[in-house]
Amino acid sequence: MALLWQKRAGGVRYEVRSAGRTVRLYTNGVLHTQYNPSRLLTGSVWDLLLLGALALPGFTPRRILVLGVGGGAVVHQLLQLFPAAQVTGVELNPVHVAVARRFFGLRDARVELVCDNAVTWLAMHDGEPFDLVIDDLFGDVDGVPCRAVAADSDWMDLLAGALARQGVLVMNFAGARELRACAWHADRALRRRFPAGLVFATPTCENRVVTFLPRDVGTAALRAACQAEPRLRQALQRHRVRALR
């Protein structure tokens, strides 16, 4: 794997590496983004963030919010699937924003990149609601990835408040333990707001990505959408999906 760029800032080591056309961003040795412009699917966790947007029949998000951009792999994927969408990406790390633009080509006019604290930004947001919100806010402890913001009732209420009435919420969890601690399991108001959910997993990592849905549709629409899109026909063979319980 070729080293394209590296930098140390604030005690953090950043590296951008390439393998063929695939570009990868590492922060303190933790893989933050992997993207190949010639492929829609990455084969890893970024696919899981994407697939939930296909779970509702006829769902075509016009306004998308991505919290935690990294290098922007899922933003590229979303724009390929939903070319008419406008994407707002909020990223705390200015190095990641610069890398996303320089090495991952995230300079599309349909994308607004905001360098800010996602919690503060979302609390202050008073604009038009979003159709799809993706919470991919991650940090690391001793090189081990973990959620940067606990998925408690306060945070999930704030996320839900940014959504349109029939909007979809996607949240990334570092593993099954983080998912079990999610407020949705015990908060009745959240379960009324999101009566169903799908849990996505992949053999390449421990992450669990949950798509919280405004109504229960099972997996039929998702499977039909993947079959209808040639670039996604292998997705549910590579990755696993089940109902949230």
Image (tube, rainbow, N blue to C red):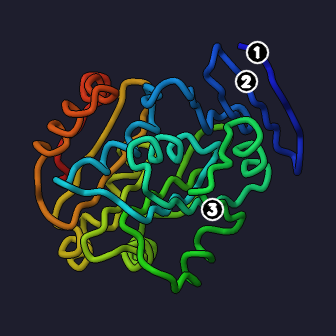
Q: Residue at x 66, y 58 (%)?
A: 91
Residue type beneath disc 3: Glu
Say which of 119 and 179 sits in front.
Answer: 119
SS type, badge 2: strand
How far apart are the two marked residues, 2 and 1, measured between alpha carbons? 5 Å
- Quarter that holds the N terminus: top right
* Percent of width and height locating residue 99: 75, 42
Location of residue 6 (image quadrant):
top right
Mark 2 — residue? 17
Please give the label number shown on residue 112: 3
SS type, badge 3: strand
Q: Are marks 2 and 1 in contact (CB under 8 Å)?
A: yes
* Percent of width and height locating residue 32: 62, 39
Residue type beneath disc 2: Arg
Residue type beneath disc 1: Ala
* Percent of width and height locating residue 114: 68, 65
Question: In the image, which is nearer the foreground, mark 2 or mark 3?
Answer: 3
